Amino acid sequence: MSKSALVSFADCLRREMKKWNVSVHTIEPTIYKTPLAAEKGMKESLDKLWEACPKEIQDSYGKQYFLDFQSSLSKQMGRAKPESKIPEVINDMVDAAAGEAPQMRYVPSVWTQFRARIISSLPMDLQDAVLCQASPQTPPAAVAAHAGESRKFSALDRLRNRGLRRYATTPAINSNDLPKVQEVPPAASADPKFKF
C-alpha cells in the first residue's frame, strides 16, 4: 500500500512543481534481497510489533491471521530479486537525477513493467483479486467470529461474494436511534427577489 500511496503523492507533486520548473520522478522497484529486506529481521520486527499491539487489536486480528500474514510475507520474500540485480535500480536513479531526458516513472526490469501493465489494464475487481493473492487468506478473527466461520477465503472468493460487509470498521447504526431533525420554515421576506 505504501508504494502506491507514494506514487500517487509523487504524481500530484509533479503536477504542482511543474510551474516552478522542477521535475519529479518515481522509481518503483520490486522486492530485492537486501539486508533491509532480510526475512529474519522482518519476522523479528513483526513479532515485536505484534507484542506491542493493544490486546483489542490482537483480538480483532487474531493469532491465526498474524501467523498467516507472516507466512504470506515469507512467500513474497522468496520471490525477491537477488542482490546482483540491484544495479538496475541504481541505473534508473542516476538517469532520473542526471539524465538528459528522464522519464516520469521508472519500473526496473522488463518483466516487472510487463506485469504492471497487464495488471493495470484489468478491471478493478480483477486487479483486486490478483493483488490480494499475496494477502493472508485467513479472515481477521473479528470478521470470522461475526460470520460464524473461520475458514480460509481467497481473493476470488471475495470477488464472488461482493456482499462481504465490514463488521470491524463500521459501526452498525439503527435509523430509529438517530435524532429527529426539525424542519425550520424559511424566513418571510418583505420583498422576495427570488421565488422558488
Image (spheres, helix red, strand yellow):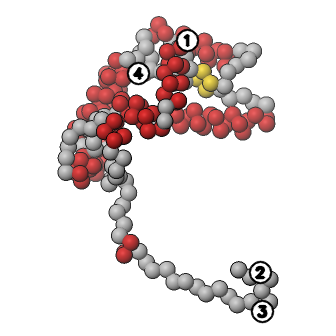
Pointer 4 residue:
37
Mark 1 / mark 2, whichever is N-terminal: 1
Q: Residue at x 20, y 43 (%)?
A: 150
Residue count near mark 2 (Cα–Cα under 10 Å), binned few <14, some 14–19, many ≥20? few
Q: Please state which of the two labelled residues, at mark 1 or mark 3, is closer to the viewer.
A: 3
Task: Check if mark 2's residue and mark 3's residue have beta carbons within 8 Å.
Answer: no
Which residue is disc 2 drawn over? Answer: 194
The amino acid type found where label 2 is placed reads Phe
Neighbours of disc 1 within 10 Å: few (<14), some (14-19), many (20+): few
Other-residue count near label 3 (Cα within 10 Å), few / some / many at <14 / 14–19 / ≥20 = few
The nearer-to-camera label among 1 and 2 is: 2
Of pointers 1 and 4, the one earlier in the residue sequence: 4
Judged from the image, the secondary structure of the residue bearing numbered disc 2 is loop
- Distance, label 4 to label 2, CA atoms, is 67 Å
The amino acid type of the residue labelled 3 equals Ala
Distance between mark 4 and mark 3 Cα atoms = 74 Å
Q: Which mark is residue 88?
A: 1
- At mark 3, the secondary structure is loop
| Residue that mark 3 sits on | 190
Measured in 3D between alpha carbons, the distance from the residue under mark 1 to the one under mark 2, in whole angstroms, is 67 Å
Q: What residue is drawn where x is 61% and y is 16%? A: 92
Q: Where is residue 63? Give x, y as percent.
A: 23, 40
How far from the left and from the top, in percent, is residue 140? Answer: 28, 44
Vertical relation: 115 (above or below) 84: below
Tell me which amino acid carries mark 4. Answer: Ala
Tell me how far mark 2 sits from mark 3, CA to CA. Answer: 12 Å
Mark 1: amino acid:
Glu
Question: Comparing marks 1 and 4, which lies closer to the viewer?
Answer: 1
Closer to us: mark 4 or mark 3? 3
